[in-house]
Amino acid sequence: MKKFTIQVLATIVGIMLLIGLFFISSILFGSIFLNKSTTKVKDNSILEITLNKSIIESSSEKNVSVFTLSEEAPLYFKDILDLINYAKTDDKIKGISLKLSNPEVGYSELSEIRQALQNFKESKKFVYSYLNDCSQKAYYLSSVADSLYLNPNATLELTGLSTEVMFFKNLGEKYGIGFDVIRHGKYKSAVEPYMRDNLSDENRQQLTELLGNIWGKVSQDISSSRKVSVDNLNKATDSLYGFISDKIISNKLVDKLINESDYDLVIKNKLGLDKGSKINKVSLTRYKETAQLNSSTKNKIALLYASGQIFSGKGEDGGIYSQSFIKQIHDIKENKDVKAVVLRINSPGGSSNASAEILYELEKLKKEKPIVVSFSDVAASGGYYIAMAADKIYAQENTITGSIGVLGLIPNVKKLANNVGITTDYVSTNANSAYYSVFNGLSDGAKNVLTKEVEIVYKKFVGVVMKNRKMTFEQVDALGGGRVWSGSSALKNGLIDQIGTFDDAIKYSAKLVKLNEYSTVTYPVEKTFLETFLSKMKSDEDDDQNIQSEATEKLIKNELGKEKYMIYQRIKNIDKERGIMYLMPYDMEIK
């Protein structure tokens, strides 16, 4: 008993010391809790947009660690749209300066930001852009500027679109890991990485069409803004003229090659400042501290974010966990101030059971409050499935969506075990008592039954789409089979209702409930740093293991970088992708 009391006291003292250090840090480095703004926007200022950090949709994607005493307030995707819109009528902001390098955001989200900048220009305020070495995404967004400048020694990465698919078949064979695969539909190629070492003809066909549609949107936008024909733009792209300075100018890809200090002079001249004056620049993060983005009205529209792969159970970071997500749905239902819901989806899908649980709860919510869906970069398979509770679905032209199909993936380590001298044997009472073993995989009987189950689950998926999209089985099946579509193709095929932005979806939801004035509230509700800190310190028998795991993950992520860390996560989470899945055909990053 005495030993127990000493342990409890030691724990309390330790927590008090950590909180004390946290408060001291907040005094030294700024007010973290109160988030009091010290920023004041001066007259004759410009809003400078860099997008040099990862852009996230919701707080569930935020990386907060107990090992970091202070974290800068994150800038969410909707913040960017709202701040650009707010600056349009802010008399202190005279224009926007874009200084982009390689924004970590998808083409669908870039298209929405680009549209917001286009709307900003209607105020007759200027949008200028300066580029050093820049990615194609940076150029796509910057091309909306009234005047576009490039460093004389820089290259402009205008190459068209490509995507690279990773295959694990040879890795599995090398280390003795096997996969029993069950799928419906020739386009359901999510399992191809475990079965093949290259693209199937069907997969290559759909990827070619998908990239062609997305590039069609990107090239048309650039063509319109730069006043260059699409044919000439594609010629410049095919010839890699963005890497040759004189070709960049002769093909009107930018307006002028100048050094950054000369760009500052251009801005000063536009603002009516003399050469020795200082430009009043305000970043998006600092501007957020001063902007009044939400009204104080009681009527609310809930923005419910579904970001990441769909899993069963509870979880807060890096995915959509059914139990945690359903709790958000219940909270919205109980909030009497919430009159309508906008479900923002950015997900490739995942567990079929978890997707079905979520859809069931969304349909119950819909009986009380209208639900409008807005697709971000990806809303495929299970991500598309949960959208079937919608009163209306919005997407961007270059959103990746559809993938109506089902797959089963069951790993085994039989060869690996045998290679290291492990064998197994078993005794059973019935024909399929040992229907699955990690050492032997699926029995023949189990394969037959699960194949039937995949067909049943697929028909349920199709049935849900039939009901929501008012189609026949044959119509949905023709669009299904796991095939993915661009937003523009999805509209033509009746899989969505309208091409539109996140803001368009919010405005429509307000229209459904006849609200002229409203404010928005996000779910999951963002926790303060202190709330997150204390929740991670709460008593639990697995605390030490969780904290060690968190520290390890953070170190690995910092060491590997974003792209290699995604590969690591995919391999690490293979075990989670067992059973029947509503999962997009592949992980893909369009470059």
Image (cartoon, grey):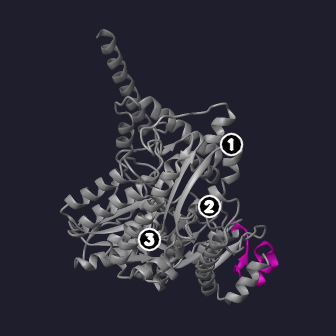
Residue type at numbered disc 1: Tyr
Q: Which residues are magenta?
A: 241-261
Q: Reply above or below: 416 against 121.
A: above
The mark nearer the N terminus, 1 or 2, is 1
Q: Decide: marks 1, 3 in contact (CB < 8 A)? A: no
Query: Which class describes the residues within 10 Å of circle 3: few (<14), some (14-19), or many (20+)?
Result: many
Mark yes or no: residue 56 visible: yes
Residue 175: give its label.
1
Residue type at numbered disc 3: Phe
Q: Reply above or below: 74 against 424.
A: below
Asked whether, in this view, residue 199 is left or right of residue 462, the answer is right
Number of numbered discs on residues: 3
Residue type at numbered disc 2: Glu
The residue beneath circle 2 is: 192
Q: Tag 3's secondary structure?
A: strand
The mark nearer the N terminus, 3 or 2, is 2
Q: Decide: marks 1, 2 in contact (CB < 8 A)? A: no
Q: Quadrant of residue 12?
A: top left
Q: Residue 149 in the image: state x and y as whole percent.
A: 68, 74
Q: Tag 2's secondary structure?
A: helix
The mark nearer the N terminus, 1 or 3, is 1
Query: Which class describes the residues within 10 Å of circle 2: few (<14), some (14-19), or many (20+)?
Result: many
Q: Tell me what residue is drawn at x 36 percent, y 75 percent.
A: 505
Q: Decide: marks 3, 2 in contact (CB < 8 A)? A: no
The residue beneath circle 3 is: 375
Image quadrant holding the C terminus, namely bottom right
Image quadrant holding the N terminus, namely top left
Q: Tell me what residue is drawn at x 61 percent, y 64 percent.
A: 589
**Separation (CA) of disc 1 from disc 2:** 18 Å
